[in-house]
């Protein structure tokens, strides 16, 4: 499985969560962004048939999910914040206000929630220039080389998409 296929699987899982949570109709599509754009590279776009804002998704792994390997107990809790900081630094000078950063997770839901709460990541990154920041991880039963991609994955909001009224109701 190549990187784009891997990102599409994550995008489809995230957009299923968006559609289920907010009763929307987004679908994943590979982007058509001009290279001259001041926006960073977009991995996947979320397109709505009902004319809602396009969602520009940028993915980054939590450093324990490389090549689809599952959480193995050696997860460093500082890595979630580090991923956000690394992406922010990487795109310094670029317009990231339309980008939704999705961290491709490998921790269990309980572990990820504990880390995000204990480090106050939601509070710390509310002022991030990213439009939204989410942690997304497959359920334990999903093997990245296998089947069952349509199961519910868990999503933890670190920074909810803004402006809230534009796409995500309060």
Image: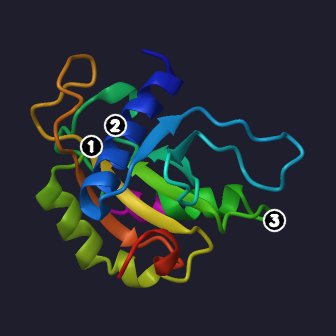
Q: Secondary structure at mark 3?
A: loop
Q: Secondary structure at mark 1?
A: loop
Q: How is the image coloured?
A: rainbow
Residue 50 image point, x, y percent: 49, 53
Q: Is residue 86 left or right of residue 144?
A: right
Q: Are marks 1 and 3 in contact (CB under 8 Å)?
A: no
Q: Are marks 2 and 1 in contact (CB under 8 Å)?
A: yes
The secondary structure making up most of the magenta span is: helix
Residue 148 image point, x, y percent: 17, 25
Examine the structure image and report whether residue 81 is included in the region drawn in magenta.
yes
Q: Residue at x 33, y 68 (%)?
A: 157
Q: Which residue is mark 3?
A: 93
Q: Which residue is mark 1?
A: 106
Examine the structure image and report whether residue 90 is included in the region drawn in magenta.
no
Q: Is residue 169 left or right of residue 56?
A: left
Q: Residue at x 55, y 48 (%)?
A: 58
Q: Is residue 64 left or right of residue 150?
A: right
Residue 115 to residue 3: above or below: below
In the picture, the quarter occupied by the C terminus is bottom left
Q: Which residues are magenta?
A: 77-82
Q: Residue at x 22, y 32 (%)?
A: 150
Q: Which residue is mark 2?
A: 65
Residue 60 image point, x, y percent: 49, 46
Residue 35 to residue 117: above or below: above
Front residue of 131/74: it is 131
Q: Residues under labels 2 and 1: Cα distance?
A: 5 Å
Which of the two discs, 1 and 3, labels the residue nearer the N terminus?
A: 3
């Amino acid at each position: 499985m190549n990187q784009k296929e891997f990102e599409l699987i994550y995008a489809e899982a995230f957009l299923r969560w968006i559609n289920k949570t907010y009763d929307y109709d987004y679908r994943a599509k590979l982007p058509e962004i001009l290279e001259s754009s001041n926006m960073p590279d977009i991995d996947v776009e979320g397109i709505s048939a009902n004319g809602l804002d396009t969602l520009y998704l940028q993915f980054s792994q939590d450093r324990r999910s490389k090549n689809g390997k599952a959480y193995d107990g050696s997860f460093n809790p500082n890595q979630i914040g580090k991923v956000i900081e690394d992406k922010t630094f990487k795109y310094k000078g670029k317009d990231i206000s339309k980008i939704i950063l999705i961290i491709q997770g490998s921790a269990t839901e309980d572990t990820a929630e504990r880390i995000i709460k204990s480090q106050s990541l939601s509070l710390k990154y509310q002022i991030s220039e990213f439009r939204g920041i989410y942690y997304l991880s497959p359920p334990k039963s999903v093997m990245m080389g296998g089947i069952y991609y349509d199961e519910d994955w868990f999503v933890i909001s670190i920074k909810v998409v803004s402006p809230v009224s534009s796409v995500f109701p309060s």
